[in-house]
Amino acid sequence: MKSKKVLALALITLSFGLVGCRSNNTDTEALNSNQESSEEVKTPSDDTIIVYSNAVSDGRGDYFKEEASKSGFKIELVDLGGTDLINRLLAEKNKPVADIVFGLNEMNFNKLAEEDLLESYKPNWLNKVDESVKINEENLYSPMDIARVFPIYNKEFVEEKDLPKDWSDLYNDEKYKNLYKVQNKLGGATDTAAMYIHLMDYKDESAELGVKDEAWDDLTKWFENGYSTPQGEDWIQNFVDGKVPYAYTYMAKPSEIEKEYGVDIGIIDPSSGVVQTVEQVGVVKDGENNQKEKEFIDWMGSTEIMKGFAEGFNQIPVNKEAQDSAPEGLKEVMESTHPADIDFDFVGKYIDQWVEYVELNIMQ
């Protein structure tokens, strides 16, 4: 947070043009004894806090920057994709530029933790985190907002009696043949999540890729029985028209589709659960006194700030006191689905290998 970091940030701007502001629960006894029970935010100095994030597009960065300024924090945002963000932090490990990292999920933050890039800190709002959310035991990163990936259906073309009970029903029952969307690529978090959910019952770390051979048999059936949207077609239009009346998506999408297309979407809660990942925040370890960074994290995850984030940007905060401010469509998803029991340390260890294997051997 010192001037050398601001200079380094300026150099990044000149070189890459990347700086911008584009748009579990834990027992109370486990919290540090010196933490405040309230969410009081101290007034910081004028030092600039540099935040690296993959989650500040579409006005979200502007929101945090403007609200931070009102509270006396001066921040600069470096907006990067998830992979680029991780690579940048690894490259800067011996001379960190970032003060805060925000937006990566628990798998990606675990990669940073394994590289000893993060400093432990327990935010003063940690005891308000939703019980369904796991908290890093070492407090190297803390949860901020929830994302879920789940199946949906078009109520105009599907009756409730015909709904699958679990993800596996879609590929084990011929009546769903070509009626559900499958991935045509694995570049995004939603598509990837809807892939690895099928591997979770087959964990076997003695196997080459960490799962039993039966996992690949099931995943092959998932792709073969479903409909991969070809170039020139749009999965949403196919879903709306009833050509492919089942799909999977992320939390904000159903209400967006309903509003734009005038359709009625149903949410499926598979018996094995849905994928729940959580965007996290953490302090970059740089050998400095990071008190201001910690105060900023206390402020960022506070009820007031998270309420505004939920209302303005279609988010579900982990802070239970802020969740009522989320849009009704997102609250419906939270109430209608339950998270699968997923070991994200395990997923993070193998995910790159799984994606490569599926793209080379199953999706061809």
Image (spheres, grey):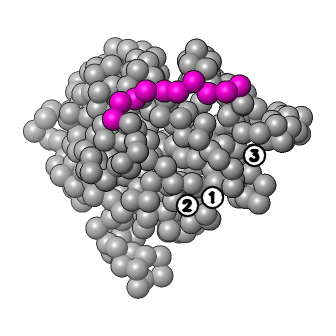
* Residues under numbered marks 1 and 2 in contact, where contact means CB atoms less than 8 Å apart: yes
* Residues under numbered marks 1 and 3 in contact, where contact means CB atoms less than 8 Å apart: no
Label 1, residues with CA under 10 Å away: few <14, some 14-19, many ≥20: many
* Residues under numbered marks 3 and 2 in contact, where contact means CB atoms less than 8 Å apart: no
Give the residue type at disc 2: Ala
Q: Position of residue 251 (x, y in %)?
A: 37, 33
Judge by depth and name the residue closer to the eye, 68 or 240.
Answer: 68
Q: Majority secondary structure of the magenta segment?
A: loop
**What residue is shown with label 1?**
117
Give the residue type at disc 3: Val
Q: Is residue 240 above or below residue 208?
A: above
Residue 355 in sight here:
no
Q: Position of residue 204 (x, y in %)?
A: 36, 79
Q: Residue at x 74, y 51 (%)?
A: 96
Q: Say whether disc 1 or disc 3 marks the residue closer to the N-terminus.
A: 3
- The Cα atoms of the two marked residues, 1 and 2, are separated by 6 Å
Q: Residue at x 55, y 61 (%)?
A: 113
Judge by depth and name the residue closer to the eye, 202 or 226.
Answer: 202
Q: Is residue 95 above or below residue 188?
A: below
Q: What residue occupies the far front of the structure in this picture?
A: 34
Magenta part of the protein: which range?
Answer: 37-46
**What residue is shown with label 2?**
113
Q: Is residue 194 left or right of residue 284?
A: left
Q: Secondary structure at mark 2?
A: helix
